[in-house]
Amino acid sequence: MKNLLSFLCVFLVSLTVLAQKQEVIWGYSGASIGAGHDMGDTYPIKCAILIPQSVLAHYKGCTITKIEVCDEQEVSELVPLICIGDGDNLVKQTPRGGVRGRNVIELETPYVISGADDLYVGCECVATYALSAVYLECTNGAYIFYNDEWLYSGDDVAYCIRAHIEGENMPIDVSLSCNKVLECSKGANLVAHPSVLNLSPEKVESVKLACYVDNEFSGFYEVKLDLEKGDLTSVDLNFTAPEVEGEHAIRVVVESVNGKVDEITGNNEISIPVTVYGKTFPRRVVMEELTGTWCGWCVRGYVALQEMAEKYPDSFIGLAYHTDDEMSDIENAQEIIDILDNPLPTGAVNRNTQTIFNCEPETLEDYIQELKNLALADIRGEVTVLDADTTAVKVNTYTEFAADATQPFAIAYVVLENGVGPYVQANNFSGADYEFYGYEKLGRHVVLVYNDVVRSVYGGAAGVEGSVPSDIHQGQTYEYQYELPLPSNVKCKSNIEVVALLMNQENGQIVNACKCSFNKNADAISTLKPANPGKSVAVYNVGGAQLNAPQRGLNLVKMSDGSVGKIVK
């Protein structure tokens, strides 16, 4: 009898374990969150991700119990949303007001999944901005309801929305995605960066991937992870590129997850297009920063430009656009400033608006990984001074492309100045309880000398029309000559540099860039060297007394390089 009771107890416990509720988190989130689309005014909006029917069929009978949303801007009348295509919300719930940040909203009535339809899952609210977005390569990650239909925002962005799905015996599953076309030279080391999304009811600690190049087996990759439910990460897969020019493909298939079979096969295989070129070029990366001496957090950008220039002297180009300060009288730059417009400090890499960020040096280092990618076009430039007073220069540029092209390209020119100042810079890092390159030990105002100060732009954001032919042939070099007057706001002509930007006019991004060399006849500025930026080590009044910070009136400043300057505050 005791044995029977023991058996029944074990049996009942086993049933309880088998029937235990599990949860998967389906959707998108991440650390690199940016504000959503600015709609210009406050509107009722609906934002969603799409969970396809092919996925939901595996969760038939399970319930959506919570919807997680994130918005950097405050929203009102927030209600979770689930709908089947026509925009009518199937969730009836009391709206929330004054909501900001990440919110997990529990449904008052859990939604039972039929598995028969695609579901749009997200929220409706009243806001000026759409929901915050994370930039990643995915599908079905960003929909907004407009004019009675769902509009898709593309394969490179996802709203920060996640559905919490509960059920029993939920499947082991990860989803792969990678929409980026890889481009490289023959036989080069090739790195693919597919994203892995954990849709399992447990932490994913390992995945086994089978990889194929042009359908020929390349090998297995055992990837160690620490991926919680609903989290997403990217992995690095290294290949040797084919030796044949043209179009190729890398196929990646999930073999197992935590040593178990991936039970949902519709999302565990991707094909990554690869274009192999006979010739590629070194890439020079451009960071454009929007800054101001009045902006206490803009010390970030100052440090970022300095750190990257020192670390990547031959491949990094910094351009600082000042606003509302002593260096803001920039000629012909408003169009670019409007592109970068965000709370200062703000910057973008190669004018890719999806890389607009707050100029943290460590964050910029992540974006600078683009340096690892070779460029498919090259640009070189040479500057000749046209008159003895150095009021104008002639720039000869030379462009070459790795493949034939018909899309529109053009060259834009930027004159920048180094060694500008000294000026008083607000410093919000003063007194911080963490280290920030020594600025935590300085006062609320510091005195700095600035490099990479943009003085004028020629050709606007799109570049000078006709500077690159419309019909481009592989391997041919195209020369273009452009005369530009030097801007009147330059303080010291021996400290100027001319930057040439090769622009893709279709997407507005910088394809490649160069700092133009000055030819041997440019006597007035042939000895040009970027000035070493410095910061103040001591500030004195005109009587010689040392001050804790610059005071109103004339100040004498001793810089870290030993020089002494004057500033008026």
Image (cartoon, rainbow, N blue to C red):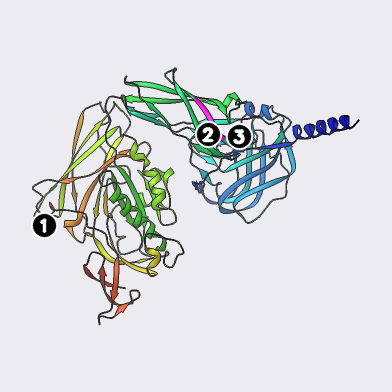
For residue 389, which numbered disc appears in the image? 1
Q: CA distance from mark 2 to mark 1?
A: 60 Å
Judged left or right of residue 569, residue 194 is right
Instruction: Give the magenta range.
Output: 205-209
Quadrant assignment, res 142? top right
Q: Which SS class for mark 3? A: loop
Is residue 283 toward the left or the right of residue 143 in the image? Answer: left
Secondary structure beneath dot 2 equals strand
Q: Check the picture and name the quadrant holding the C terminus.
A: bottom left
Mark 3–mark 2 CB contact (< 8 Å): no
Which residue type does callout 1 highlight?
A: Asp
Label 3 packing within 10 angstroms: few (<14), some (14-19), many (20+): many
> If you read the primary sequence from the N terminus, does the residue marked by circle 1 or circle 3 appear first?
3
Task: Name the amino acid, label 2.
Answer: Val
**The N terminus: image quadrant:** top right
The residue pinned by badge 3 equals 199
Give the alpha-carbon distance from disc 1 to disc 3, as whole Å: 67 Å
Task: Count numbered badges in the picture.
Answer: 3
